[in-house]
Image (spheres, helix red, strand yellow):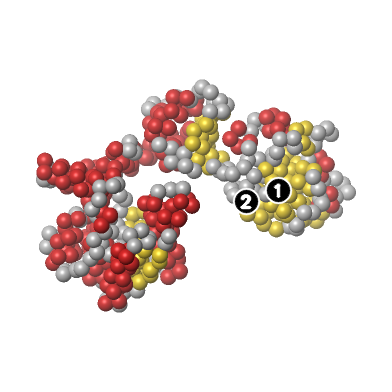
Amino acid sequence: MERKEFLHTVQTFIEQNRLFTKNDRILVGVSGGVDSITLVQTLYELGYEVAIAHCNFMLRGDESDGDQNFVVEYANARSIPIHVCSFDTRSVAQERKISVEMAARELRYEWFETVCTLNTYTKIAIAHNQNDSIETFFINLLRSAGIKGLTGIPKINGMVVRPLLAVTRQDIEAFALQSSLSYRVDSSNLANDYLRNKIRNIILPELQAIAPNCLQAVSTSMAHMQQAHALYSGAVAEKQKLCCSPTDSGFVIDESKLLAQEFASTLLYEFLYPYGFNPTVISQIFDSVGTQAGKTFEAEEYVALHDRNCLFVERKRTVGQDSILIQQPGTFELQNGVLHFSAIPCGEFVLDKRRSVACVDYAKLTFPLLLRVWRQGDSFVPFGMNGRKKVSDFLIDEKVPLLQKQHVLVLESNGEIVWVVGHRVSQLFAITEHTGAVAKFVLER
C-alpha cells in the first residue's frame, strides 16, 4: 500500500466508523514501536489534535528507558504534548495476584483515563491493527470464548478507539519505510513465550503460505461475526431479562426458567462468561443445576452458588470488611453501597416501609453505633415480638440465600442490635408516642 493510500484508508475508516472528529482532543498511546509511531504520525499528518502517552513498565531495563527517551524525542521534535509515567509492573502484578501482562494492561488504561480527565482529552487512540485483531480471533478460538470472542478487537470501547484496524502490519511497516520513520523494536515480541507471539510468529506465517489471502479472509469472517453477534446479543439480552434478577452485588438466575429455554447451556455461558467464569467451570455449573444446594463455583472476582432452585452470582468480598463506628448523623461508605443516617423531629417524620430503611427512636441510641457483619450467637428482639431470636434463625426464616447470608450487616448500640440491615429493626428501639426525634437509616446499594 502506498503512503497516500494508507492515509486515505485510515481517514475513511475513522469517518465511516465515527471514531472521532477534528473537534476531539486525542491521547495516543505510544510505546515507540512501529505500530504506535505510525498511528500518531498518521493522525498528526491528517490534522487531528493529538497528545502522546508513554508508559515505562520497567520490565526490560535499559531497553525500556531507551523506548521512553525515543518517544520523548519524537514528541519534542514535532511539538506534540507528551505524558510519561513509570510503573513497577512486577510488584503490582504480585500485589494484585495477576500476570505481569495483565498488570501492564490494567496500569496502562487506568493511567490513560486519569490523564484524559486531568487534561480534557476526549478519545484514547490505540495502535491495534488488523493482524492484532486476527491474532485475538485465534486466541479466543483456542480458549472457547464464544461468538463474541470471534469478532476480534472492537473498533470502539468507551473512550478507546483503534484507527489502524483497517490496515495490516505489513501496510504499517511500508508506511514507516516510505515516511522514513524511526521506531523501536521490542525484543520480547520476537520470543515465542506467549500464545500471541506463537500465533504471530508461527501460525499466521504458515497460514499465509497455504492461503496468501488468509488475513483478508479472516477479517471478512470477523466482520460477519460482528453483525451476527449484534443480532445474537439482542436475543440473549431478552432471555437474560426472563431468567435473571439483580441483587445487591450481582444477580440470581432462576434455574427452572433457564432449563425451560432452548439452548439453556449456551444461555448460561453467555450469562456467566462476562463475570470471569471460564467455559470448563460454566459447563460444571450447568451439569450441577437442580442438584446439590450450597455447591459453589469460583471465578477471580465472583462466586456462583446453588440455593433453592436458583443460582446466585455475587461479587466476592471479605467477611467482616464493613465495620464502621458511627458517632453522629452523616453518610457512610460501605463496600457495596452507602448508609445515610439522619435525625428527624417526630412531627416531620413520615413512615417509610422499604426494607432498606430503618426508623427508630433516636433517644434510645447510645453512641457510637457499630455497623458490622453479623456473627454466630447474635440475637435481637424482632419488631412485633417480645422475645429474643437468634439472627441465624431469623435469616433462615427470611429465606436469605446462603451466599448473601454471610454478608448481612447489623447495626449495634451498646451491644444491642438495633437493625438487621435490610431486614428488620429491633422492638427495643421502636418509635412510640413518647418519641421526640427519629433516627432514620437508609441503605443505598
Q: Please give the name of the residue rendered at 25% of the width and 47% of the height, measured from the top-left corner.
A: 192
Question: Residue 203 at x, y = what percent?
Answer: 20, 43
Q: Residues within 10 Å of mark 1 (few under 14, many from 20)?
A: many
Label 1 secondary element: strand
Q: Could you tell whether 279 is left or right of 417 in the image?
A: left
Q: Could you tell whether 297 is left or right of 66 in the image?
A: right
Q: Can see residue 134? A: no
Question: Residue 429 at x, y = what percent?
Answer: 81, 44
Residue bearing mark 1: 371
Q: Can see residue 66? A: yes
Viewer-nearest residue: 216 or 174: 174
Q: Please give the name of the residue rendered at 45% of the width and 56% of the height, measured from the top-left corner.
A: 91
Label 2 secondary element: strand
Question: Residue 62 at x, y = what percent?
Answer: 32, 65
Which picture quadrant has residue 405? Answer: top right
Q: Amino acid at mark 1?
A: Leu
* Quadrant containing the N terminus in the rendered view: bottom left
Residue bearing mark 2: 334
* Furthest residue in direction top, as rendered: 291
Q: Please give the name of the residue rendered at 80% of the width and 37% of the height, measured from the top-left corner.
A: 381
Q: Relative to 419, is 6 above or below?
A: below
> Do the CB atoms of the residues marked 1 and 2 lie less than 8 Å apart?
yes
Question: Residue 342 at x, y = what percent?
Answer: 73, 55
The total number of labels drawn is 2
